[in-house]
Amino acid sequence: MSDFDPVTLEILWSRLIAITDESAAALVRTSFSTIVRESNDYATVLMNADGDALAENTAGIPSFVGILPRTLKHMLARIPAGEWRPGDCVITNDPWMATGHLPDITMAAPIFHRGRLVGFSGSIAHSPDIGGSLWSADCRELYEEGLRILPVKFLRAGEPNRDLFDMIASNVRLPEQVLGDLWAQVTAQQVLARRLTEFLDDAGMPDLRALSRTLHERAEHAMRKAIEAVPDGDYRSTILADGFDADETRIECRVAVHGSELLVDYAGTSRQIDRGLNSVMNYTYAYTVYPIKCALDPLTPRNEGSYRPVAVTAPEGSILNPRFPAPCNARQLTGHLLAGAVYACLAQAIPDRVIAECGSAPSLRALFSGVDARGQRFTQILFASGGMGATAEGDGLSTTAFPTNSGAGSIEAFESLAPVVVWKKEYRMDSGGAGRHRGGLGQEIVIEVRSPEPVRLSLLADRQKYPARGLRGGGDGAPVEIALADGRQPHQKSRTMLAPGDRLILKFAGGGGFGDPRQRDPAAVREDVENGLVSREAARRDHGVE
Amino acid sequence: MRHRIRVGVDVGGTFTDFVLVDEERDLIYTGKRLTTPDDPGDAILAGLERLVRDAGVSVQALDGVVHGTTLVANTLIEGTGAKVGLVTTRGFRDALEMGREIRYDLYDLFATRPAPLVPRRRRHEVAERVAADGTVLEALDPSDVRRVARDLRADGVEAVAVCLVHAYRNPAHEQLVARVLAEELPGLPVSVSSDVAPEIREYERTSTTCANAYVRPRMQRYLERLEARLAKLGVRGPLHIMLSGGGITTVRAAREHPIRLVESGPAAGAMAAAYYGSLARTPSMISFDMGGTTAKMCLIEHGWPARVHELEAGRVRRFRKGSGHPLKVPVVEMIEIGAGGGSIARVDAMGLLKVGPQSAGAEPGPVCYGRGGRFPTVTDADLLLGYLSPDYFLGGEMRLDRAAVERAIEEHVARPLGLPVHDAAVGIHNVVNENMAAATRMHVAEKGRDPRRYTLVAFGGAGPVHAWGLARLLKIPRIVCPFGAGVTSALGMLVAAPAIDLTRSYVARLASLDWARVETLFAGMETEARALLTETGADPAEISVRRAADMRYAGQGFEVTVPLPDGALGPARLGEVEAAFHATYRERFGREIGDVAVEALSWRLSASAPVPNVSVKFGGQPTDAGEPRKSTRAVWFPDTGVAPCPVLNRYALPAGLEFIGPVVVEERESTTVIGPGSRVTVDAHLNLLIDLEPGRP
């Protein structure tokens, strides 16, 4: 039985989550990385002395679900627990130990209370730069993709490891910002540690042992109950994606529900590829568990217990579990597909709890780098999204990403940081999949290069061949289209040079529809036509509405 | 400017509150009426007549009326604003609806977004383009604007918003649009982004401009009519309007920029708290306003509530950031959480006790009201713990049903949790306090502060009931519970000064800044500010001006507002400005970053007249004769459990009285709960000063 009554437990649990949220707020506000800010590409996690997650920050993104404890265990394997001193902080960005690509920096620091190790604070954040090829999908092996740091002490008893600092600073493009962000992570972890010791004092607890056990049991119990509500069975789906040139990506997914246990297996999935699309097992795991949690148990706070009833397996050497040193810089182009694969399985059992495929799974990114008119170097990523899939309850959200949750920055701010002009950023008519509920719309963006020198464009895109599919009779969303105004077609996963005056046209994919389009409320169809979201022809063709 | 007799009127969702201060006679009168939603002026007029009668003064003797209202916020929440047309740059008509393209709830697959204030068919584009540096890439042809004007007229719009890309940097095209629209659509209110919110970021600027246009026709009608009705009644003093930023302004300014009134009520509450804090000589305060649905907390430093330049209105999910319309307006910075007397307690799927954010509101209200509320609330738990009297709620106007509460808590909380009813009530009380403590702790920490340095100023119906428990959790040593907690916001309007906040965006690194341009921007803002404040009746010699800039390290996405040194700025003072940034940054985040350039985005000017020197003494004399002690009843406290506790009548407590908790002090609109060992002093203004650690110096 539990050592805590339900009132105390609620209070203690909420407070632990608030502590990780406070730590996350400190990280975001002091970060230089646009990706941390606009993409929420960060996490802060409290772990107990065994390295198991107790609380994760509320707004953390799916990429990092459940990963930090795994990374910490790798760190502990190289640096045994007895060698962690107060004020130490360990760092790594190894894709296999951590989050699947080099730009994500993972840190962990021990928390001591009254002289005893009681837990670890952890953080992950996407660095402004990690050297190598910038963010691109076309590298052949990991070594091209940037600097790799195996677990090593970043701080020793609070003192910076100068050799490591110098090594990082001499291998990245924006050393002050990169180091500034590493300090932001340290600050966030210090906040977490300080609050945790206050918490232990207030609660009169010597350590987190008893509380961990109870919290893990509760979260596990909630997840098991949610799985039990899904009819037992073996559900299968296949997802195809553009992949790299002739190498299309094929995801074979099997979701096996048995009682309170759920297994996701990817046997039969494409082999690993010598381009940066490989999703290491940690990333595959995170993007498999996240959509399951959304559909089955969205309300329970996450901790180690939430993940216990779910197992994820993928064959070694596949694109979902590649061997070192496979390139993996653009692993999101594969990992984001898994939500659609899992939902295509769950839709066979619980169609009302899932969503149709999303236009921005995977996300479409365009990275511009070069030198502006004042001779200053710039690197800017355009953040924007396609449409979400529709659900049994309503239309998909337009221009919104799922499963990732990257926002879009301001175009005015974008133009003040990079020598480009955005001539258009608007909804793409007829891009949402038709259905009883319409898929969310994608968007069209037109960008002109205005710098005196050519600019390097790195595209990270998919869904040109394979659009987001509808569910339960809903239609597919419009696919991605990428072209230059003069008709040239830049490669969707490579680097291209753009000349001054070139205009890039990006059409983001729409989400899939849900249900029979003929059952859509005619008033909703007319409203869409009146607002220019759906053409008259499409209204007639898909919905039979004049 | 000397006002001898002034009235503050706060129109809330349920009640309209009145405060009359007569400085000559050192008297204060208060009043309360039910709000008249169809025309809030009805309640104002009726209440005002009654108030002056009570005070024994004539309407003609009033030197001024200050008014705050929830009308703007309600219009946004209820979606009852005007039919608005938007004119924007070609290619950008969807900026308003796309927003930040973010899911505000990471785990909810079915979350919806607020409908845009202007539907797509009313968002019109004109061919034009200004670049980030303000140069014109594509000139605007007035005939294109005339084409749009024809469409707007045919559509029958009631107001127009104009927001063009980079207009914060170069407003010429927006001004041209406004001129052409004024010719083509005379009399139609036009809100222009470079005037309403001249700040970089097109979504936020468009949203603010559209919201202004959306509420403007209704507010214009309302304010014109109210002004006329007051004049007809015989009020000769000016009508001033409370702003969200804590200042007051003229009716003319309020009609043009009604969006700046969106949080006027809560802002007035914070101003009142600041005032009470200054009476109690406590410079650093957390104002704590707990009502039926929400708790609002605000940090006050050196007598000034913290302010920010952005808020959200009309949220789809009330307490979820990102689910509403962003507004770039100066506003008293407040955290609001779903913790009030009406917050409902329930057991979740995990078997844990949750309280709020769902609320029973005023109707049906808590179970104890006996008006059909079925689910136990915070107020119900407070009743069982002995904090509230079943016989003296709202001064005895409403009897509370204790037996019904016991049944409801048993059914919905105690049995599912396997706890006795009493323990469940304790749990509800503790969980709601913990929720408020967590939110406050986080807010204070984000500003790099420590709650232990602060005094809690508690008001609102439930504030004084929960202040002691909240203060204990936050380790706050001192609480002030002001007299007249029921009309705090109305009072706040009388202690607010005429003020205006202006902003201009000019993005540049400090090292390469055109300081002459900065000085020109500030000079323009100062001229505008002084003209407006003079119009409110302020003495030009007494106007104070503060300048600030939003700055960050180049490459960051968040800015901090940095107070600028006084006097003309120029390259010679670069070091001072940089030092000011570093100091602010260090205060907020605990560190600085070397070797990274600093950039400024927006330049802000705040101007205000001196704070009216209001004395709110309540005479220093108890208003009830007789024995302070009413009774003794069983009350629960964490360290003692349920034990007999004296109950005092607030209206019979004389200035200078001291006593030690546990004690419960009752007044009509609230109850102050003080736990064992805390020392209470009644000050000269009849405020209760509660010292939680009387042993410490």
Image (cartoon, helix red, strand yellow):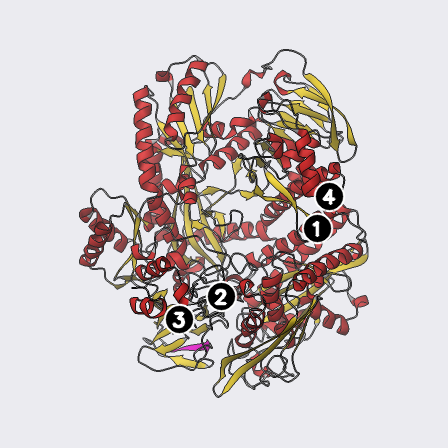
Residue B233 image-quadrant placement: top left
For disc 3, the chain is A
Same subunit, labels 1 and 2: the answer reads no
Magenta residue check for A459: yes
At numbered mark 3, what does the secondary structure look like: helix, strand or loop? loop
For discs 1 and 4, the disc positioned in front in the rendered view: 4
**In this orientation, does residue B3 appear?**
no
Same subunit, labels 2 and 3: the answer reads yes
Report whether B398 appears left or right of A435: right
Residue at (52% x, 29% y) in the render: B488
Report whether A323 appears left or right of A405: right
At numbered mark 4, what does the secondary structure look like: helix, strand or loop? helix
* Residue at image mark 3: A372
For the N terminus of chain B, give its image quadrant: top left
For discs 1 and 2, the disc positioned in front in the rendered view: 1
**In this orientation, does residue B603 appear?**
yes
* Residue at image mark 1: B351
At numbered mark 2, what does the secondary structure look like: helix, strand or loop? loop
Report the magenta stretch's main SS: strand
Q: Distance between the residues labelled 1 and 4?
A: 11 Å
Disc 2: CA contacts within 10 A as few (<14), some (14-19) or many (>=20)? many
Q: What stretch is highlighted in magenta?
A: A454-460
Q: What residue type is labelled 2?
A: Ala
Report whether A434 appears left or right of A280: left
Q: Which of B602 and B624 is in front in this view?
A: B624
Q: How far apart are marks 4 and 3 (CA)?
A: 68 Å
* Residue at image mark 4: B415
* Residue at image mark 2: A401
Same subunit, labels 1 and 3: the answer reads no
For discs 2 and 4, the disc positioned in front in the rendered view: 4
